[in-house]
Amino acid sequence: MLLRSAIVLLLVVASPGAVEAFSSSAASRAPSSSSSSSSSNTNKDKKADGEWIAKTFELDSVVQGPGHVLMYDTTLRDGTQGESVSASVEDKFKIFKRLAAFDMDYIEAGWPGSNPKDAAFFERAQTELTPVEHAKLVAFGSTRRKGITAADDKQVQALLDSGAPTLCLVAKGHAWQVTEILRASLEENLAMIEETVDYTVRQHGRTVMVDLEHFFDGYKQDAEYSIKCCQAAIKGGAVCLVLCDTNGGTMPWEVTQIVKDLWNKLEGKVTLGIHCHNDCGMAVANSMMAVDAGVGLVQGTINGIGERTGNADLCAVLPNLALKCQSQIACKSNLRQLTSMSRYVDEILNRTPNHAAPYVGSAAFAHKGGLHVAAMQRSSASYQHTEPTDVGNESRVLISELSGRQNIMGKIQAIGVDPQVASDRALAILNRVKELEAKGYTFEGADASVHLMILHASKGYCPPFKVLDYAAQVYDANMDSASRFADEDEAACTPGLGPTARATVKVRTINPNPPAFDPKTPEKDADLHQEVLEVSDGNGPVDALANALMRALQPVHPFLRNIELVDYKVRILDPESATRANTRVMIEFRDASTDSTWTTVSVDTNVISASLNALIDGFEYALIEHAESCNLCEDAF
């Protein structure tokens, strides 16, 4: 079986000393004294290392935390049950392959008997996954329905037809759920568990785990029956019992007590797993407490997505186990890819990343308070629990009205300005930041604007272009409001629909064909620059301005063809001022050639002017940071 072979492989490659150490460590953590005694006797009786390995791990196949933990990802099944989360078959393949490359132990890809999309995935998976990837594949399903045999249950047959080497069967582990929700007898539920596991394991050779749904709630109400459910699964041949906090209402201390109690009652005969939901905000904490109590497999999702408030976030559980508990997990060597994997999954699922997510969020290692930043200058350990590079993230210093001089100093030095010059300039820039934030600016999410503010305060800097003036016209040849919602066919036949704005911009920029320098006629230096007038239509004035600005700059700065506008946000800062209100505009840009992004901000009572200023800053930052262009001169403009 896959679970057993994974443990055998782990220990075969280890030295005899390492094997003994693993055995001793596991025995010392076992809640049951009889379990420790059994491990000790096995160790004494071994005739050879190979025989001992086979006896202890191939036959018993028990994985016990926190020393060793298997990671089980259910993003593609339980994760997609979250609100506004959906994945196509192609999306599933992309995410599956990324998880496999990260070396996740098990990847649950869906329920083949529940919908055509999952059935299509498993059908293609048999030929489109590599052998290594396919070995990690898990198909999710349920035990047989009441009143029929497992062999006659079409859903069970779909699980077998999926070709997945590992199956995860969900079963009721709560007496009340069995009688009131499933409407089956307690005895029938036990038979459903044992017979389905036996059929899939002994007759079809699959590795089977059992998700005991509502287990913790059931254990608190009727522990004896919940234990009988576990015993039925073990008797059928299950290699792992996954204890589910389905409603997410169990507290961490309850998890610890119940896991230890169950381990003792089952005499450590089977690997225990944990599956937590986050309804009380305890999913990660409960998963960690379960591992500390002896659980050897953790189920969860990337970024904690899932039904209702989500599942245990593997992007927090994984680094907690690897960095805080020193657990042996297969993907530990790939931990530096965690942040990029988190953002990749969000991108594929079209989700906005949680900036405040532990470990992987963009704010996870961001520092704003002046005292904090000053302390960080002396030691990163002053306000960071681990190095951000351990999980592929980075430390950031935020600029705001709460910033201190050290915040600005760090930004200035990062640009490459001499520290002494930076010290002289920092206070003036800090005061400027506070003045602008009082007017409605926010620089926390607009590092590019801060970067430009520092450069514009630097002697010898000149921008690669300058907008001299602009004009924007909004027009509409069809004033029928209903036509704005016309479908494509109707729009094609309706005169007047199309661009609704036209913008003109006048830009001074570098002359791509300057005359040769003649010291006798220095006035010709003016020919080093040119003024360009461009006009463009667009779907609204901001779109028209962006198009016109691009047309004016691209002939001289072809690099800008790589730049995309990926987000545009407008916020009214003082609604009581109505149409005279200050408006804050934030625009996010992306360099398609490197996938890097940056954001600019501007505030004005005129939303068009605020938008144009943010556009100008975004293009200027692109040319300074990403293009090969000089930005130092003597008052060129």
Image (spheres, grey):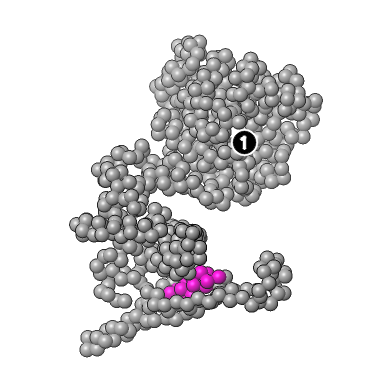
Residue 506's spot in the image, x, y percent? 42, 79
Residue 272's spot in the image, x, y percent? 56, 24
> At 29% across and 57% down in the image, what residue appears?
431
Residue in the foreground of this view, choosing between 404 and 212:
404
> At 48% across and 11% down in the image, what residue appears?
33
Residue 311 versus residue 476 in the image, above or below: above
Tell whether 637 sits left or right of 168: left
Q: Is residue 589 visible?
A: no
Residue 119 versus residue 525 in the image, above or below: above
Q: Which quadrant of the figure has residue 187?
A: top right
> At 36% across and 68% down in the image, what residue appears?
628
Residue in the foreground of this view, choosing between 140 and 78:
78
Kindly identify which residue carries mark 1. 138
Position of the C terminus by quadrant: bottom left
Can residue 31 be found in the magenta stretch? no
Position of the N terminus by quadrant: top right
Q: Main secondary structure of the magenta part?
A: helix
Residue range corresponding to the magenta coloring: 540-554
Q: Is residue 486 visible?
A: yes
> At 65% across and 32% down in the image, what residue appears?
167
Judged from this view, the residue extending furthest toward the bottom is 520
The residue type indicated by label 1 comes to: Val
Residue 268's spot in the image, x, y percent? 54, 17
Q: Which quadrant of the figure has residue 325?
A: top left
Tell whether 477 sits left or right of 325: right
Can residue 552 be found in the magenta stretch? yes
- For mark 1, give the secondary structure: strand
Judged from this view, the residue extending furthest toward the front is 576
Q: How many marks overall?
A: 1
Residue 180 versus residue 472 in the image, above or below: above
Tell whether 46 sits left or right of 192: left
Judged from this view, the residue extending furthest toward the left is 420
